[in-house]
Image (spheres, grey):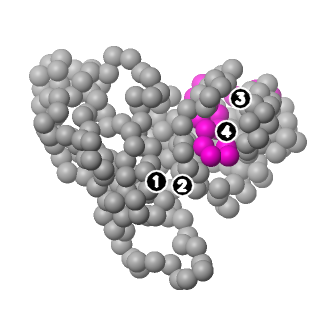
Amino acid sequence: MWAMSESVPVRCPACRREHLYAAPSYPCACGAPVSPHLDRRGSATAVTRRAWEEEWITVRCESCGHDGQWPRPELGCPCGTVLRVTVAEAGAVAEAPPGPASAPEARPAPRRPFQTVAIRTARDAVTATALYLRWLGYRDIRRADQRPPSGIGIAARGLLAQVDPSVRPASVRDVECLWLTAMTESSRCVYFSLAGYADDAHGRADRLGVPLFVLDLTGTPRAVNDMADTLHTTGA
């Protein structure tokens, strides 16, 4: 589970019920937990529509200075309203990770175990994928410029990823479209699916060199072909 930052009061504008909320912390690439500063004087707003640009915020790690993109803090009220919590303008909260201050010289520090986020919605699937890609070492994660025929496209520096939160296995056409789009952008590509892959899609991905992952409901990506195993082991 994520470490939690300082709690702030949040009032629901629909039912006026007050909650105590603490933003979750996420692991920076340097290993330090990072969480956004919450604005104690701000008012929570009800989420009535979803737009990709509004789902993410930039948070700076105070340990290493890296600016990362993380999910915007939200809270579900028992009345059914989803509340968007106000974030302060200034940086982030980051605590130095336990253990040695640095790895031995000329030897990269091992990656920490991947911290999962439970998947209940399509947005959770995208969040879990973005966190996993960042854990692998990819940077500048954002919405893909081209919308895929199915699922949700996200991009990182040198990588195009497709997240398929549907209940049907990904088809051979889905895999081919991702590969072709990545080829036009001179990027690597990787596919994440909740429902797995059709047999012919799996075979075509192997021939095209497309890593395939299955996301379980805990948010854990599971490699289902050799390319995905290699990506999980070596990272970006």
Provide the residue designation for mark 4.
160
The amino acid at mark 2 is Trp
Q: Residue furthest right?
A: 207
Q: Name the image quarter holding the C terminus.
A: bottom right
Q: Is residue 170 above or below residue 70?
A: above
Q: Earlier in the sequence, mark 4 or mark 1?
A: 1
SS for callout 4: strand
Residue 200 is left or right of residue 37, and the answer is: right
SS for callout 3: loop
Q: Position of residue 83 (x, y in %)?
A: 26, 27
Q: Earlier in the sequence, mark 3 or mark 2?
A: 2
Marks 2 and 1: which is nearer the front?
A: 2
Near-viewer residue (109 or 78): 109
Image quarter for residue 64?
Answer: bottom left
Q: Which residues are magenta?
A: 153-172
Near-viewer residue (99 or 117): 99
Near-viewer residue (1 or 96): 96
Provide the residue designation for mark 3.
170
The amino acid at mark 4 is Leu
Residue 48 is left or right of residue 29, and the answer is: left
The amino acid at mark 3 is Ala
Q: Is residue 201 above or below residue 159?
A: above
Q: Earlier in the sequence, mark 2 or mark 1?
A: 1
Image quarter for residue 171?
Answer: top right
The answer to whether mark 4 and mark 3 are in CB contact below 8 A is no
Q: Earlier in the sequence, mark 4 or mark 3?
A: 4
Q: Earlier in the sequence, mark 1 or mark 3?
A: 1
Provide the residue designation for mark 2.
135
Task: Give residue 115's mark.
Answer: 1
Q: Is residue 70 visible?
A: yes
